[in-house]
Image: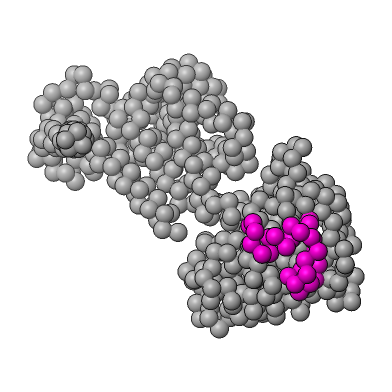
Amino acid sequence: MENIKETNGAQPILQLKNVSISYTPGKKAVDNVSADIYPNTITAIMGPSGCGKSTLLRGINRMHDLYPNVKTTGEIYLKGRNVLTMNAMEVRRMAGMVFQQPNPFPTMSIYDNVLAGYSLNGIRLGKKEKDEIVRESLQSVALWDEVKDVMNKRGSFLSGGQQQRLCIARTLALKPEVLLMDEPTSALDPISTNKIEELLLGLKRQFTIIIVTHNMSQAARISDNSMFMFLGELIEYNNTTQMFTKPQHKKTEEYLTGVFG
Amino acid sequence: MKDKLFKILLFASAVIILLLTAGIVYALVGKSLDVFQEYGVWGFLSNAEWDPRSATEEYGAFSFVIGTLYTSFFALLLCVPFSLPVALFNGEYFKGKKISSFVSSVVDLLAGIPSIVYGLWGFYTLRPLVIELGVNAQGFGIFLSSIVLAVMIIPYASSLSTEFLSMVPNNLKEGAYSLGATQIEVIQHISLPMASSGIVASYILALGRALGETMAVTMLIGNTNNIPSGLRDTGNTMASIIANQFGEADGLKLSALIAIGLLLFVITAIINFIAKLVMKKLAAV
C-alpha cells in the first residue's frame, strides 16, 4: 500500500498495535487494527454502520471499561505510554471525548459545565483561574460571545449546535492531547455542522483530532488522513485526498462511490 | 359499536371510582361535623386533651397529630441511611445485574409482609431489645414504633429511588466518565443531582405511608393520650387512636374519631400532592 499519510514530519502521538475489541467472546467488533496517528492532524474514521469505528474510538479512551463484558486486546500507546495499563481516569483526561448527542450536564450552569472536568475530578481552582479557563475554552469553540452574558443559565438552555460546542469546550478545558469525536455533528443541522467543522480546522493547530463520521463529504472537507473500516477491519488508512481520488482497495472504492453504505 | 361500548365501560369505571372517593369524603365530613360544631375546627385540632369520661368529656386531636408526626419523621430519618444505599446498589452499581434483581426482590418482599406481622415482630423481638437498651421500662413507645415503621417504608423509598436513579441518561454518565470522573464522582455530581427531586419525592411518598400505618404502630406505641415528651415516651398516632377506640365509641367521641380520620386523609392527600409536584419539577429538567 502506498503510504503518503500526512505526518507533519512528526512522530506519531497515538499508536494502535493489533487492537481487537469484542463484546461477546469470539466475536470481534474491531479486528486486529494497527495505525499511527500523527499530531496536529484530523483523522477521519469512516465505514458503514456496525463496522466498528465507534467501538475503536471508544477503545482509545477506555470507555469500554464501563461495560464488564467488553474485551480489548493489543496495545495502544498515547505519547509513548501504554493506555491499556494506565489509570483509566488519567487516559480519559488525556484523550477527551465528544459524543454523538450533545450531552451538557443539565443540573449545571454553562460556566460549571465548562469546568465540569475539574469539579468532577475534585480539582479546586481559584476564581480567577476558573474565569480564565472558562473564557479561553469558550473562545476556542467560538461560543464566548454568544453565552458570556448567560453564564449562569443551564447548559440545556442552549441550541443543539451551541450545546455541542459547549461539550467540546468542556473537553478542551482539560487540555487533552487527543480529541476523540464520535459523529459529533450527526444530530445537528447543516449550519451548526458547518460551524463545528470550521472550528475543528482551527483546533488542530493545538490538538490532535480523531473523528468518526458517517458523512463522507465531511471527511473529505476536514480530515488530513482517513481510515476506512469494514466488518471490524481497517481496510485502508491513507492521506484523505489520496483515499478519495485513488483508493487502494476495492472495498474502499465501492464505499466511497456509494455501492454500499 | 364495540369501540363505543368499550369507551362507555371505561368511562363508567372511572366515574365509579370518582363517586366512591367523593362518597368517602362526604361521609367523613358529614360525621365529623358534630365535633367541629362543638369545638370549632381549630379548637379541635389544637386541643391536646382527650378525655372520654362522660362527666368531663373533652376531645382534641393535637396529641395524636404530634404523635403521628413524631413517629413518621423519625422513621423517615431512620429509613434514609438504609434505603439510599440500596437504591445506589440497585440503580447504579449493579444496575441490570442478577444480584440487583435479587436484592430488589428481597426488598420488595419486605413490602409484602402484613402490618400485623411487623407488629408481632416488634412486640416479641424488638421490644425486649429496646428494654435492654434502656430506652424505657416497657419498651413500648415512639422509639419502638419508629424503628418498625422505618423497616416498613424502606422498600417504598428504595424501589422508587432506584427507579429514578436508573433513569439518569447513560450519555450524561458517559460524558462524566469521559472527563476522567470515577464512579463515586459520577454518582455525586451527576446521578444524585439528576435524580434528586425524584429521590425526594420517593421519601415524601414513604412518609405518606408512615403517616397512615396503623396496625403495627397500634401494637407498639403504648397508646397513651398525651403529647409524647420525647422518643422514649409512649403516645398515640391518629391512626392508632382510631384503631384503639372506635369499637366502643358513639356520639361526640365517634364524631371526634371520624374527624381525626378525615384529618389523616387530608394530610396524606397533601403529602401525595407535594410528591407529585416535586416529580413534575423533575420532568421539567
Residue A237 part of the magenta segment: yes
Query: In the figure, A183 relative to B123: above or below?
Result: below
Quadrant for residue A225, please give it: bottom right
**Front residue of this view, candidates B144 and A258:** A258
- Report x, y in % for residue A84: 83, 51
Report if residue A112 is visible in the image. no
Report if residue B279 is visible in the image. yes
Query: In the figure, A197 relative to A230: above or below?
Result: below
Residue B174 part of the magenta segment: no
**Front residue of this view, candidates B117 and B187:** B187
Residue at figure coordinates x 58%, y 51% from the top left:
B170
**Front residue of this view, candidates B189 and B70:** B189
Instruction: Classify residue A147 as left or right of residue B54.
Output: right
Instruction: Classify residue A2 as left or right of residue A45.
Output: right
Instruction: Classify residue A71 as left or right of residue A255.
Output: right
Colour mode of the rendering: one colour
Quadrant for residue A168, please give it: bottom right
- Report x, y in % for residue B114: 40, 21
Instruction: Classify residue B260 as left or right of residue B151.
Output: left
Please identify the residue farthest to the bottom as the structure is shown: A145
- Report x, y in % for residue B51: 21, 29
Task: Give the magenta-colored segment's residue range.
Answer: A234-261
Residue at figure coordinates x 52%, y 54% from the top left:
B194
Residue at figure coordinates x 61%, y 31% from the top left:
B98
- The quadrant the C terminus of chain A occupies is bottom right
- Report x, y in % for residue B147: 48, 30
Residue at figure coordinates x 35%, y 30% from the top left:
B213
